[in-house]
């Protein structure tokens, strides 16, 4: 989701291909031996594998323009802070929230030996998300966007993770107005519209999911 947001923010056209990594397709494994998404394939055949290589490549290969500024920050300290917060959400939030909720509720359905949802993990995920919302609120009391004065990849990565949890209806928006206001700002950007249109067969999102005035 974050890679899709970055492509849209940089005004780069892309054809999106649905890949089911658990199927272990030979053609996909030939592109990425790890068998994981995302994979970015350029017109000339160059394949970039993994979220961090993809975003770094997009920033270097398609430098900023007035219409699409850099999403990694404009100064060295800002870039360092962007990378720190990308790590926070792509590692810490993912470990404490996303894996406990999205993995247990959705991904296990498609895994051959996934088993049933772990209720303990789900409870932990729901308990942990409040701390992350509080941290977002703390940042927004001091900054215009998560990493500083400008929208950055930190906002895109955080919102991508949170949007997946929001699809499940597990974000307690009523507990933190500042975090909700930040998410509403990101959610209202044109780059977010395709994500809000995504649906999983047999698992529709809650009514507020695509509502910009939720």
Image: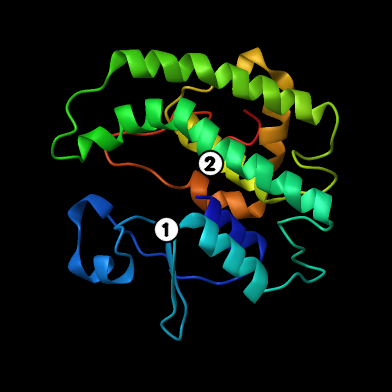
Q: Which of the two marks, 2 or 1, is nearer to us in this view?
A: 2
Q: Position of residue 26 (x, y in %)?
A: 19, 68
- What residue is shown at x 47% (from left), y 47% (from top)? 197
Q: Position of residue 210 (x, y in %)?
A: 54, 38
Is residue 194 left or right of 179 when viewed as pictured? left
In the rendered view, would you say 26 is above or below 107?
below
**Of helix, strand and loop, which one carries label 1?**
loop
* Residue 71 sits in quarter: bottom right
Q: Decide which of tag 2 and tag 1 comes sooner along the chain.
A: 1
Q: Which numbered tag is attached to residue 97?
A: none
Q: Position of residue 76 (x, y in %)?
A: 81, 55
The residue beneath circle 2 is 90
The residue beneath circle 1 is 38
Compare residues 101 and 12 and report the one nearer the observer. 101
Mark 2 Cα-neighbour bin, 10 Å: few <14, some 14–19, many ≥20: many
- What residue is shown at x 29% (from left), y 37% (from top)? 107
In the rendered view, would you say 163 is above or below 56?
above
**Of helix, strand and loop, which one carries label 2?**
helix
**Which quadrant, please, contains the C terminus?**
top right
Q: How many marks?
A: 2
The CA span between labels 2 and 1 is: 14 Å
In the rendered view, would you say 40 is above or below 150?
below
């Amino acid at each position: 989701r974050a890679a899709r947001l970055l492509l849209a923010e940089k005004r780069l056209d892309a054809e999106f291909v649905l890949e089911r990594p658990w199927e272990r397709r030979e053609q996909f494994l030939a592109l990425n031996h790890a068998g994981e998404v995302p994979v970015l394939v350029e017109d000339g055949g160059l394949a970039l594998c993994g979220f961090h290589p993809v975003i770094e490549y997009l920033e270097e290969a398609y430098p900023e323009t007035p219409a699409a500024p850099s999403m990694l920050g404009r100064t060295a300290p800002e870039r360092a802070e962007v990378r720190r917060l990308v790590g926070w959400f792509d590692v810490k939030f993912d470990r404490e929230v996303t894996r406990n909720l999205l993995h247990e509720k959705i991904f296990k359905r498609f895994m051959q030996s996934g088993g049933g949802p772990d209720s303990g993990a789900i409870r932990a995920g729901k308990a942990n998300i409040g701390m992350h919302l509080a941290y977002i609120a703390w940042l927004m009391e001091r900054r215009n966007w998560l990493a500083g004065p400008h929208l950055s990849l930190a906002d895109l990565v955080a919102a991508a993770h949170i949007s997946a949890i929001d699809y499940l209806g597990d974000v307690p928006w009523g507990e933190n107005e500042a975090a909700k206001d930040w998410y509403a700002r990101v959610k209202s950007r044109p780059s977010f519209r395709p994500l809000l249109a995504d649906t999983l067969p047999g698992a529709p999102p809650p009514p507020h999911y695509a509502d910009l005035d939720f």
